[in-house]
Every structure is written in C-alpha cells, then in structure tokens.
Image: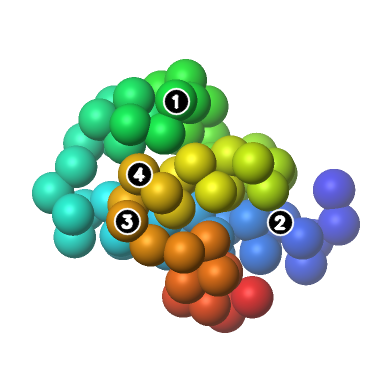
C-alpha cells in the first residue's frame, strides 16, 4: 500500500478511537453498535484496514456523528 494512504488510514483510525473514547465506549461496544467484528474494528483504529464507505457510515452512526466529521477530524 502507498505510504500516504497508510498515513491517512492511521489518521482516520486515530479520529475514530478519539471519538469512541470521548463517547465512553469500549472498542467492543462500538464494534457491536456498528455491526462490525471487534477484531476488524481494532484494525480500523490502528490504520491496518482500508475502511469501506459502508463501514465508515456504520461507525459514524454508532458514534452519533456524520462520516464527514470523522474524515474532517482525520484531516482528510
């Protein structure tokens, strides 16, 4: 994977983790609320997985934010 893309995925993961912690949710609770496997959620937060638009939408809904807010917080 191209280095710049890796950095973007890490930035998005950091933004998701920050929002999750601010919401007082465990990674497992967020994964459950978003309908995503917990191990997959961990990989998303660590920037190890390219997030589909569908999963980004699911995560954002579980955090009660718009997907665009997560992208903005990630600097994307």
Counting other residues with Cα less than 10 Å from the Cα at mark 3, is it few (<14), some (14-19), or many (20 or more)?
A: few
Q: Is residue 47 left or right of residue 19?
A: right
Q: Residue at x 55, y 49 (%)?
A: 57
Judging by the rendered image, the residue that carries numbered circle 2 is: 6
* Residue 51, image x, y percentages: 65, 44
Is the Cβ of the residue at disc 3 closer than 8 Å to that at disc 4? yes
Which of pointers 1 and 2 lies earlier in the amino acid sequence?
Answer: 2
Q: Is residue 53 left or right of residue 16?
A: right
| C-alpha separation, residue under disc 3 versus residue under disc 1 | 14 Å
Is the Cβ of the residue at disc 3 closer than 8 Å to that at disc 1? no
Q: Quadrant of residue 59?
A: top left
* Residue 73, image x, y percentages: 46, 75
Which of pointers 3 and 1 lies earlier in the amino acid sequence?
Answer: 1
Counting other residues with Cα less than 10 Å from the Cα at mark 1, is it few (<14), some (14-19), or many (20 or more)?
A: some
Judging by the rendered image, the residue that carries numbered circle 1 is: 35
Which of pointers 2 and 4 lies earlier in the amino acid sequence?
Answer: 2
* Residue 75, image x, y percentages: 57, 79
- Secondary structure beneath dot 4 equals helix
- Secondary structure beneath dot 1 equals loop
Judging by the rendered image, the residue that carries numbered circle 3 is: 64
| C-alpha separation, residue under disc 3 versus residue under disc 4 | 6 Å
Which of pointers 1 and 4 lies earlier in the amino acid sequence?
Answer: 1
Counting other residues with Cα less than 10 Å from the Cα at mark 2, is it few (<14), some (14-19), or many (20 or more)?
A: some
Q: Residue furthest right?
A: 2
Judging by the rendered image, the residue that carries numbered circle 4 is: 62
- Secondary structure beneath dot 2 equals helix
Q: Residue furthest left?
A: 24
Which of pointers 3 and 2 lies earlier in the amino acid sequence?
Answer: 2
Q: Is residue 26 left or right of residue 68?
A: left
| C-alpha separation, residue under disc 2 versus residue under disc 4 | 24 Å
Is the Cβ of the residue at disc 2 closer than 8 Å to that at disc 4? no
Looking at the picture, the colour scheme in use is rainbow
């Amino acid at each position: 994977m191209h280095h710049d893309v890796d950095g973007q995925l890490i930035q998005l993961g950091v933004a998701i983790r920050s929002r999750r912690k601010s919401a007082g949710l465990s990674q497992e609770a967020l994964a459950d609320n978003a309908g995503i496997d917990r191990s997959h959620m961990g990989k998303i937060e660590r920037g190890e997985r390219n997030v589909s638009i569908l999963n980004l939408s699911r995560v954002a809904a579980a955090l009660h934010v718009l997907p665009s807010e997560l992208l903005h917080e990630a600097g994307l």
